[in-house]
Image (cartoon, grey):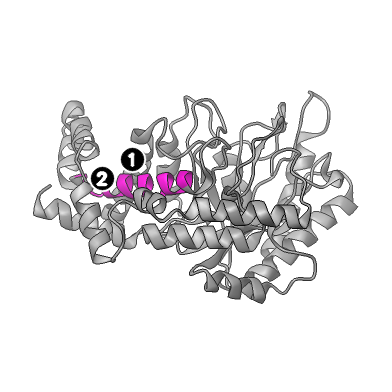
Amino acid sequence: MTSVQLRRAREALDSFAVETPSWGFADTGTRFGKFFQDAAAIDLSDKLADAGHVHALTGCCPTVAVHVLWDFKPGEDPKAVARLARKHGVKIGAINPNLFQDQSYKWGSFGNADPAVRARAIQHCVDSIAIGRAVGSEYLSLWFADGTNYPGQESIRDRKARFEEALRACHKQLGPKQKMLIEYKPFEPAFYATDIADWGMALLLAKKAGPRAKVLVDTGHHYSAQNIEQIVAWLLDEDMLGGFHFNDRRYADDDLTLGSIDPYQVFRIFHEIHFFAADRGRRPKIAYMIDQCHNEKPKIEATIQTVVMAQELYAKAALVDHAALRRAQAKNNVVDAELILKRAFFTDVAPALAAWRRAQKLPLDPLAEHRRRGYAKIAAADRVRRRKELGLKRGGGFA
């Protein structure tokens, strides 16, 4: 690396933070079942401890996304949860309502034809907004399983109108420092018409909801042939890109560790963000979050892998020579324009990562340090014992 590249990569790392998900540390699975891990978190305290451990090793994961139904006990003081997070060296990040698990949501939540069910879903979001204010969270992150499975099952336009009304109602309840992130997914669990199936639908709904609503891009929520970085560029240009959920996929929403399938795609996404910042003279405010919960890799190791990969690819994308790229683009020099990206992607940023970690007094190899400390073995022994003492039975589906 040149001295200029080293400086640019380190500056990028200084500005980069990515949020870990509480559910990524717990037992998860598919609709078919779970494969259990002894070291998987039992409760929110375990999740926050694991998240704090990851942050201590990587230095770039100061916040933890939480799921209201899975992480908050009925009647629990949210401020007590915020204090617990601080005890483990992190803060509570995005608040995720649960609008898909309850039996009342069989026909949808915001899209449901029953006004009582819609009112229940809206109230849950309002309660989640209140939790967010209490813990100092900036983001309400919304994903919906709503949709239909058969042609003619329901009016697509009616469901759209219900979503518009419900999202506006929630937006009105946001505090002055809170934002609403609207996620999209092309299919699953709805297989005919998902109510928010792509970025255009999410964009329109966000604009109708209010000025503090933005779009959330989950890198796994796209068809295999889609150009995600083009979506990112359009949302950036419209000032409507609110955040990411990072994971990787070979087919659809596979929830694999970031970069395990296509690291160049993630690099290209980061390049569009750096390119935008260079053109506009300002770095866009984007909530970078992880959303992975595949159940084969050890939970903490998988999280560390994704965090380190995100740091590496973000630093690589910062090395693109934008002036040279603009010159090549102006001359329609396709070969040189592509090679400018490729040179940055294939640059070894290990020296920059090492220098940054030394400056932050962090381990040079977070994964190796995690293994050296024996954290997972200690956690497993403690959690196996506690499960026996509590008489916890393990089973069921996804989370």
Which residue is at a point 55% across and 36% down the rendered structure image?
Answer: 221
Residue drawn where x is 77% and y is 60% of the image: 124
Q: How many marks?
A: 2
Circle 1 Cα neighbour tier, 10 Å, few/some/many (<14 / 14–19 / ≥20): many
Vertical relation: 241 (above or below) 174:
above
Asked whether the viewer can see residue 211, the reply is no
Q: Is residue 165 above or below residue 156?
A: below
Quarter of the image containing the C terminus? Answer: top right
Disc sitting over residue 316 in the figure? 2
Q: Nearer the viewer, residue 391 or 4?
A: 391
Q: Looking at this view, name the residue that lies furthest to the left.
A: 2
Gap between marks 2 and 1, in whole Å? Answer: 7 Å
* Magenta residue span: 301-320
Expressed as whole percent of the image width and height from the top left, the position of residue 78 reads 68, 72
Q: Position of residue 153 (x, y in %)?
A: 83, 28
Asked if the residues shown at circle 2 and circle 1 are in contact, with their CB atoms under 8 angstroms apart, the answer is yes
Amino acid type, mark 2:
Lys
Image spot of residue 141 (x, y percent): 61, 55
Residue 381, position as x, y percentages in the image? 59, 53
Look at the numbered disc 2 and give the secondary structure of its residue: helix
Earlier in the chain: of badge 2 and badge 1, it is 1
* Residue at x 51%, y 59% (from the top left corner): 51
- Residue 121 in the figure: left or right of residue 398: right
Residue 13 on the magenta span: no
**Residue type at numbered disc 1:** Phe
Q: Quadrant of residue 4?
A: bottom left
Q: Nearer the viewer, residue 243 or 249?
A: 249
| Dominant secondary structure, magenta | helix
Residue 267: mark: 1
Left or right: residue 165 compared with residue 21? right
